[in-house]
Each structure stands twice: as C-alpha cells, then as structure tokens.
Amino acid sequence: MNTADQYLKAIYLAQMMEDGPASTGQLADMLDVSPASVNEMIGKLEDRGLADHEKYKGVELTDDGIGRARDALQTYCIIERFLANVLEVESYREEARALESVIDDTVAERLDTIIDRRSECPDCFDPEADRCECLIAEGQAD
Amino acid sequence: MSLGQRVSTDRQLARLLQIGVVLEEVVEARAYSHLESLSPDERAELDEEIAELLDHAAEESAEHRARLESLVDEMDAETVGYDEIELLVREHYASNQPEDFDGLLYDQLCNEETAYKFYDDLIEAIEASDADYTVDEELVLDTLYAIREEEKEGVEEVTAIMEDRE
C-alpha cells in the first residue's frame, strides 16, 4: 500500500469516527507524521480529485477518494486477519500497521484466498477499536 | 501507522519472510491440487508442457520455501505452525479449481506474478532501510534476488505457453 493510500485510509476512518470532515491534527496523530506532511499530502490528494479540503473545517474524501480508501482498508483488513487468524500473531494491529506499506494489494488478494473474509469487508472494520470485527483471535490478542 | 516502504525491525523482516513462505505454500499447493484434481481423461488431454510446468512450479516453490524458512530460523522469530498453514491452504484450494486449462494457466501466472511483486517490494523495502538485522542482510538480499529471478522466469515460462496456445 503506498503512502497516498495510507492517507486515504486514515481520512476515511477519521471521517467515520467524527461523522464529518477529518482534521489535520487528527490525521497527523493517526499517521504519526507532522501536520506539515499532512497538509502537503492533502494538497496532492486534492490535485488528484480524491479529497476536498476546506480551511478550519477539515478534509473530506470525494467519491473516487472513498473508493480508493475502501480498497486500502480492505487490504489492511486482510493483513490484520491474516496475521491474527493464520499466523496467530498477538500484536496483530501493531504488526499490520508496520507491514501495510510493504504489502501490495495483489499480494493481499493472494493472502485473502486462505482467510475466510466476509463479503461485507471492509465494513467489518471498527475504526474505534482499530480492528476488523471478524477476527477470531481477539481473546488471545493484546 | 508507519509511513514509507521500509523494513525497520528484525520482527518485521521475519514476518515478511514468513509471509513469503505462505505465498510459496500457496503456489505449491495450488499447482499440486490442479494436477490432482484432473480426471484420467483430462490428464491424458493435458499437454506435457503444462504438466511439466506445474510439476516444476511445485518443486521450485518447495525449494523457495525451504530457503526462506532457513533465513527465518536464523532469526529470533516466533514460531509459525507451517503444517497447519499447509493444511489450511490445501483445504481452500481443494474447493476452488479453475474450470479449464486456460484458467489453470492464468491462475499459475497470477501466482508467479504475485510472488515476483512481493519479493520485488521486499527487496526495495530492505534496501531502503538502514536497520541492522540479526541475520546477515547480504545473505537475505542474495536469497531474495535469486528467488525473484526464478519467479520472473516462471512468469515468462507461463506467458510463453499461453501465447503458444492462442
């Protein structure tokens, strides 16, 4: 997943949690980067027609941005489920975040063939809990 | 969430190598299950070229898997139950077969391409990192370069057969 996709995913989740536009500060916290980096990337996403940014209000994804963000979230969800359910990794959230930039969506699709992912994915992802709701390993996790 | 494509810790590297093992497992199980799923008539109809391709793919994946596993063994990584994963992969593929030889070749192509992409990204991520791993980085990279090359050859081989059949 490339950096732009990671931003799109974060904006999408922030919008879900806030039920409205995402703030630059919230995104900087979620992505562990500086607000300046967030502003720079938001500008690029706006240029590509993936997001709209209004000063003092925040950033919202366009329909195209939402589509890309949902694909990125699905890839993340697959990685999380694969780590938790197949490799039985306890710290699956932390590891999924560390690995998402290296795992391409085509690779995630291949891993997807050995996990029982449900058709509602990525709506199965709970942004507050920061995990897929369908993980079977929660009892053993964190 | 850490941005940027790099492998910055030992644990990340070990986990990615383990994912490589699983991907190889997928290729191997898939190739074998394709062969095993064929009826005697279909087997008779199967081009020798395709049968050899699947056989070779399965053998090569087993060899790649062993090479990756030996790297993981050198690291202080959590153990993964590969036997269970092997069963899981085979169970999923037993119920999910392509409908014809073209589908079978296309599936094999996707497997090889996915593996190639994975190793390519992994090499780039290791090279972008200045982390010190407990395993010799040069050995890891040499192994990954060699495996990536073989995956590339696999892609070319399947593509050539597909083109010949058109």
Image (tube, coloured by chain):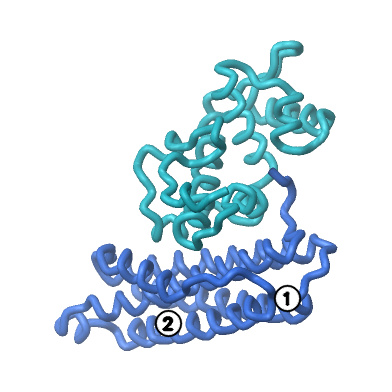
Chain colours: A cyan, B blue
- Give the chain of mark 2: B
User: In this rendering, is residue A18 above or below B54?
Assistant: above
Q: Nearer the viewer, residue A138 or B10?
A: A138
Find residue B165 and report its horizontal and vertical position in percent. 34, 74
Left or right: B142, with B18 as reference point:
right
Image quarter of residue B11: bottom right
Task: State the SS at label 2.
Answer: helix
Q: Residue at x 62, y 21 (%)?
A: A60
Residue occupying the far top of the picture: A56
Q: Amino acid at mark 2?
A: Ala
Please report whichever mark, 1 or 2, sits nearer to the chain's N-terminal start.
Answer: 2
Q: Which label number is shown at residue B141?
A: 1
Task: State the SS at label 1.
Answer: helix
User: In this rendering, is residue A127 above or below B117?
Assistant: above
Residue occupying the far front of the picture: A139
Q: Amino acid at mark 1?
A: Leu
Find residue B116 and report its horizontal and vertical position in percent. 57, 68
Find residue B152 and report its horizontal and vertical position in percent. 57, 74
Q: Which label number is shown at residue B58?
A: 2
Q: Residue at x 48, y 78 (%)?
A: B157
Q: Residue at x 80, y 61 (%)?
A: B129
Q: Residue at x 50, y 45 (%)?
A: A77
- Give the chain of mark 1: B
Find residue A17 and report its horizontal and vertical position in percent. 57, 23
